[in-house]
Image (spheres, rainbow, N blue to C red):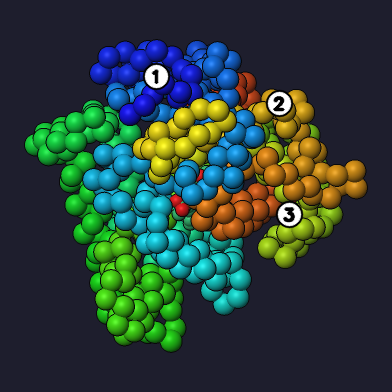
């Protein structure tokens, strides 16, 4: 590999590269720190990346072991790479722990190529069918929100003023939507099997990201060790496999090709159609469906849940914005019917508020890693084939060349002089280019319905004397707010 003209960056240590110098302090803080003082923000990896931008500029590199990683910062760089050089920058790297778990099938971590394209096109088209018409997920989302509203009030009453942690309720409602979409079933959050699947998925993620099992990424054979996190990871994987395979088998037994109930049915119908057409090397198989289900669960739950949690948090911290959103909902929807998707377009301030929180919170701060599929010249540097490329979406949303006062919370930046919603191309919480989020429309639908329904019903505030959590968030697969509680009161205009 010719590394003479790679983007600048800190000098790597032998064997381990820059991981020790750059990120170990962040993890020490995460694992042993106290969680709520200002050092949490300082030790967030995003703060480390910002420091590197100030030293090396908007394209810099570092090494993880001997793997070259390039980080693209600011709107111009990310746009240039993913919109102007899509054939080079749309591949995914082979991350050992992810490869072991996904076999590089599914969509999120599938290599860029014809199989990914066919699978993605099919799932994307299918997902769109759940936005409108008889398969619309709107009733399911509204039903979930009705439960959230009842439980929020009940838990608030029981809390004696300490407030409610909204995270489990929101997470459950969001997971229910994914369940309905993929598996056609709505589970109650006390349903044992459902809770088990969700906790298995959460545990699997936790082990792969935040335990000694991360070492599998450097020494893949560790995966087979018969103890500790390694053994647990294999067990979790086996349990998820049994659960999902059972559900797929049940779908096959009860499949009615004329009346598909969900994405799994539609996938099986496509699979049978391709078999009937004699497509011998079709990638549409039960095995592939299995990995797609896993992908949609992982990609569609934490992202949406944390976006809602950030929105609630910003609204309690900015009560004047909360009032303005509520005034708009009262004016357009009133208090006698629940807000619905038909109200989209008539609630620009509410939509602008959702977008402004998505901008500042940057729930998927570094996107999903991309990989250069060939050696290329980019902005005067050589990016060798196989380089891992991270789009720093967090930096795009705070880029002072495209946002005025980027650190300030100001929903009005998304509105024109007449109060109409502005489209801003530098607003990219769902990424950009060929790998842009496949669930963007579903996520926007969920965010809109959740925010309008909850804000129509309740006033939210922080419990008396409770300091707000640190605002940079907990860095993981997604950027989550630190846990917080809210006090909930029914709005009189709506009672
Ligand atoms: C990929 C954000 C919800 C499915 C992504 C990416 C981002 C993102 C930044 C990476 C884009 C890239 O690689 O450059 C979000 C946010 C969400 C959300 C902020 C919620 C607010 C969802 C939902 C689903 C979903 C609800 C599905 C039901 C996917 C899939 C990919 C993806 C399948 C991989 C696309 C590919 O590799 O071709 N998302 N997402 N996401 N997302 Fe989402």
Residue 163, horizontal then vertical, whole percent? 56, 34
- The label on residue 23 is 1
Mark 2 closeness class: few <14, some 14–19, many ≥20 residues within 10 Å = some
Mark 1 closeness class: few <14, some 14–19, many ≥20 residues within 10 Å = some
Q: Earlier in the sequence, mark 3 or mark 1?
A: 1
Q: Earlier in the sequence, mark 2 or mark 3?
A: 2
* In the image, residue 233 above or below residue 482: below
Mark 3 closeness class: few <14, some 14–19, many ≥20 residues within 10 Å = few
- Looking at the image, is mark 1 or mark 2 nearer the viewer? 2
Q: Quadrant of residue 271?
A: bottom left
* In the image, residue 410 above or below residue 344: above
- Looking at the image, is mark 2 or mark 3 nearer the viewer? 2
Quarter of the rendering occupied by the C terminus: bottom right
Residue indicated by mark 2: 400
Residue at x 72% of width, y 65% of height: 342
Do tag 1 and tag 2 residues touch (Cβ < 8 Å)? no
Quarter of the rendering occupied by the N terminus: top left
Residue 307, horizontal then vertical, whole percent? 56, 42
Q: For disc 2, does the CB lie below 8 Å from ligand 1?
A: no
Task: Tell me how many marks there are.
Answer: 3
* In the image, residue 338 above or below residue 18: below
Residue indicated by mark 3: 495
Distance Cα–Cα, label 3 vs label 1: 51 Å
């Amino acid at each position: 590999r010719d590394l003479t003209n790679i983007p600048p960056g800190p000098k790597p240590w032998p064997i381990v590269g820059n991981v020790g110098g750059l990120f170990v302090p962040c993890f020490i803080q995460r694992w042993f720190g106290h969680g709520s003082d200002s050092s949490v923000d300082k030790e967030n990896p995003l703060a480390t990346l910002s420091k590197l931008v100030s030293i090396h500029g908007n394209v810099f590199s570092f090494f993880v072991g001997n793997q070259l990683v390039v980080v693209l910062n600011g709107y111009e760089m990310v746009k240039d790479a993913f919109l102007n050089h899509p054939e080079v920058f749309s591949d995914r790297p082979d991350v050992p722990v992810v490869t072991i778990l996904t076999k590089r099938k599914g969509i999120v971590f599938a290599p860029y190529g014809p199989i990914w394209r066919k699978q993605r096109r099919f799932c994307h088209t299918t997902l769109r069918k759940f936005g409108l018409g008889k398969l619309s997920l709107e009733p399911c989302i509204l039903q979930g929100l009705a439960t959230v509203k009842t439980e929020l009030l009940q838990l608030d009453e029981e809390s004696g003023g300490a407030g409610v942690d909204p995270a489990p309720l929101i997470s459950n409602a969001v997971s229910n939507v994914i369940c309905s979409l993929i598996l056609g079933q709505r589970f109650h959050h006390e349903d044992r099997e459902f809770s088990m699947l969700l906790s298995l998925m959460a545990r699997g993620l936790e082990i792969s990201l935040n335990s000694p099992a991360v070492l599998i990424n450097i020494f893949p054979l560790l995966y087979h060790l018969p103890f500790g996190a390694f053994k647990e990871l294999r067990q979790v994987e086996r349990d998820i496999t049994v659960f999902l395979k059972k559900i797929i088998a049940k779908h096959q037994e009860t499949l009615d090709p004329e009346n598909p109930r969900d994405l799994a049915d539609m996938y099986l119908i496509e699979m049978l159609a391709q078999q009937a057409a004699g497509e011998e090397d079709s990638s549409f198989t039960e095995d592939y469906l299995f990995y797609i289900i896993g992908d949609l669960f992982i990609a569609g739950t934490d992202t949406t849940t944390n976006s809602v949690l950030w929105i609630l948090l910003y609204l309690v911290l900015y009560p004047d914005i909360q009032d303005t959103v509520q005034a708009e909902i009262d004016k357009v929807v009133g208090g006698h019917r629940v807000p619905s998707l038909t109200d989209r377009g008539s609630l620009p301030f509410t939509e602008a508020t959702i977008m402004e929180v998505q901008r500042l919170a940057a729930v998927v701060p570094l996107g999903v890693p991309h990989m250069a599929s060939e050696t290329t010249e980019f902005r005067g540097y050589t990016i060798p084939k196989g380089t891992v490329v991270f789009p720093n979406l967090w930096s795009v949303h705070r880029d002072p060349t495209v946002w005025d006062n980027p650190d300030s919370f100001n929903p009005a930046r998304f509105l024109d002089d007449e109060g109409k919603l502005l489209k801003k191309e530098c607003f990219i919480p769902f990424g950009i280019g060929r790998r842009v989020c496949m669930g963007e429309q579903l996520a926007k639908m969920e965010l809109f319905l959740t925010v309008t329904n909850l804000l129509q019903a309740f006033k939210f505030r922080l419990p008396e004397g409770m300091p707000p959590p640190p605002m940079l968030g907990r860095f993981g697969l997604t950027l989550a707010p630190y846990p917080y509680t809210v006090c909930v009161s029914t709005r009189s205009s709506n009672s």
